[in-house]
Amino acid sequence: MTHSTSAPASETTILSVQVQGTSTLILSGGTLTLTGDSSHDSTARNFTLSGGTLDGSGLLTVTGAMTWSSGTQQGTGTTRIATGGTLTKTTTSFVNLIDRTLRVETSAVVAGGAITLNGATIETTSATATFELQADADLHGTFAGEPEKFLNAGILRKTTGTLESIVGVEVVNDGTVTASSGTLSLDGGDGAGSQTGSFTGGTAPSLARVKFTGGNFDVAASAFATLNDGVEQAGATLEGAGTWRVNGTYTWSSGTQQGPGVTRIATVILTVTGMTVDGQGLAIADG
């Protein structure tokens, strides 16, 4: 059985929706607004969003496969890709996430194009949850109101495409950020957040890079974040009272390091091609 909301001029407001068994909820046009509170959550085994708008303050949990080829998710609610579920953003088009939270507990793939966030948040919730950018796909931010955020407790990775994937939203990394192909550029800083995770590009001869290209990235006091092979600071600011631990071949081509913390260099290679160092207590140490 397939449940479909497809009339492009229609607007449907309901408390919650329950799609049973192996059925698929299809939204191809119009607006579906979910208003349920925590006792009236919505659930779908499979969800196809190919047009229209998912809206509202309610929670929609997808336990199977969600396919997102076009359309908008918005409102103050949450779309939850539950443990065992998957999200695939298909096609080279841009889709929109406005004010809403997208929570990934297992796997999400952006196979092309971009997701544009406007006041929205994407979360990976466990160490094994993955959010994958393929074919040089991007995450765009508008910075028009509330900040757009990627809160990573799992793995944010770029796996295909030889050019650049730009993450133009705030990234707070408590897990792993990796690139195995092309360049993954972090261009939005971390806002009020701070880093405790690791960042890893490719090991020679691989040219894959994770680049800090814009914004301010912080490590709080008594905390540390790790910069492994294939990481480049190329215009951003690394700061804070904690420790940036360089544990691989790291390139500092431009940008600033500041604050009372420490940049600690292990017995590896640091390549500096242009820099500004600013702040008391900044040290470069071996060991």
Image (cartoon, helix red, strand yellow):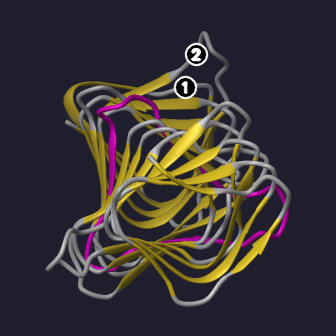
- Which one is in front, 277 or 95? 277
- Which one is in front, 215 or 29? 215
Residue shown at 76%/57% (left/top)?
147
Residue shown at 24%/86% (left/top)?
162
Give the residue at the far top of this rendering.
Answer: 39
Vertical relation: 40 (above or below) 123: above
Q: Position of residue 52 (x, y in %)?
A: 51, 63
* Residue 138 in which image quadrant: bottom left
Q: Position of residue 66 (x, y in %)?
A: 30, 47
**Quadrant of the image containing the N terminus:** top left
Residue 277 is one of the magenta-drawn residues? no
Residue shown at 62%/25% (left/top)?
15
Query: Does label 1 or label 2 sit earlier along the sequence?
Result: 1
Instruction: Give the secondary structure at mark 1.
Output: loop
Residue 128 is one of the magenta-drawn residues? yes
Q: Position of residue 201 (x, y in %)?
A: 31, 66
Vertical relation: 60 (above or below) 195: above
Q: Position of residue 216 (x, y in %)?
A: 73, 64
Question: Left or right: 61 with respect to 112?
Answer: right
Give the amino acid at mark 2. Answer: His
Q: Which residues are magenta?
A: 123-150
Give the amino acid at mark 1. Answer: Ser
Q: Which residue is mark 2?
A: 40
Question: Left or right: 183 with respect to 212?
Answer: left
Question: Left or right: 18 with respect to 128?
Answer: right
Question: Left or right: 130 with respect to 192?
Answer: left
Q: Residues within 10 Å of mark 2 (few under 14, many from 20)?
A: some
Instruction: Indicate which disc residue 137 carries.
Output: none
Q: Which residue is mark 1?
A: 16
